[in-house]
């Protein structure tokens, strides 16, 4: 008997791949945001220290939600750092950055995640997976707001 979840699993290889790219991206971004949280300095320390914590908590929640959705549709989330670094659209940070560059880096990374999420929305539509599509659309709204607020912080 073919179930709804089996149908998704059979028709959604591309969706599963893009969801794993998202998991990998969230994982690398989570680590990067911790780096920024720990090493931010300067007059905006308190503001950015708290903001980076808020964002790494968002990254964790999104990564977990995507991984659980991937399992629900018959996929297997990437779960090692080796796989995540290989698949991630987000680059690790090298060295220590000034606070403003940290924020600029986060803005660029969130925009990258929005692009990958849009790919996921497309693939979810192709797989007729409305639940995944809806989840990802919700992510984009939240990330668009974060990008706007961080750009306002930067005066852009």
Image (cartoon, helix red, strand yellow):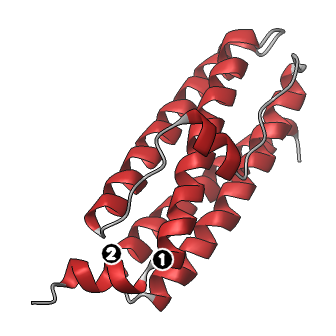
Place of residue 61 in the rendered image (x, y in percent of width and height, measured from the top left): 41, 42
Point 54% across, 77% down: residue: 14
Place of residue 85 in the rendered image (x, y in percent of width and height, measured from the top left): 67, 41
In this view, the residue in front, 25 or 104, is: 25
Numbered mark located on residue 131 in the image: 2
Q: Determine whether, in the image, residue 115 is placed left or right of residue 57.
A: right
Q: Determine whether, in the image, residue 14 is placed left or right of residue 107.
A: left
Place of residue 106 in the rendered image (x, y in percent of width and height, measured from the top left): 75, 39
Numbered mark located on residue 144 in the image: none
| Dot 2 alpha-carbon crowd within 10 angstroms: few under 14, some 14 to 19, many 20 or more | few
95 up-or-down from 72: above or below: above
Q: Determine whether, in the image, residue 2 is placed left or right of residue 77.
A: left
Place of residue 119 in the rendered image (x, y in percent of width and height, measured from the top left): 62, 74
Point 58% across, 34% down: residue: 81
Can you identify the residue that label 1 sits on? 13
Point 59% across, 20% down: residue: 50
């Amino acid at each position: 008997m073919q179930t709804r979840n089996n149908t998704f699993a059979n028709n959604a290889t591309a969706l599963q791949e893009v969801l794993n790219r998202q998991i990998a991206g969230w994982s690398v971004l989570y680590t990067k945001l911790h780096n920024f949280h720990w090493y931010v300095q300067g007059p905006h320390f308190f503001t950015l220290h708290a903001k980076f914590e808020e964002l790494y908590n968002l990254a964790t929640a999104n990564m977990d939600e995507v991984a659980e959705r991937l399992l629900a549709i018959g996929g297997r989330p990437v779960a090692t750092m080796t796989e995540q670094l290989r698949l991630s659209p987000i680059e690790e940070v090298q060295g220590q950055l000034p606070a403003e560059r940290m924020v600029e880096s986060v803005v660029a990374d969130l925009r990258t995640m929005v692009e990958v999420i849009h790919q996921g929305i497309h693939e979810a539509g192709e797989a007729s997976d409305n639940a995944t599509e809806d989840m990802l659309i919700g992510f984009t709204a939240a990330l668009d707001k974060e990008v706007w607020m961080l750009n306002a912080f930067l005066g852009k």
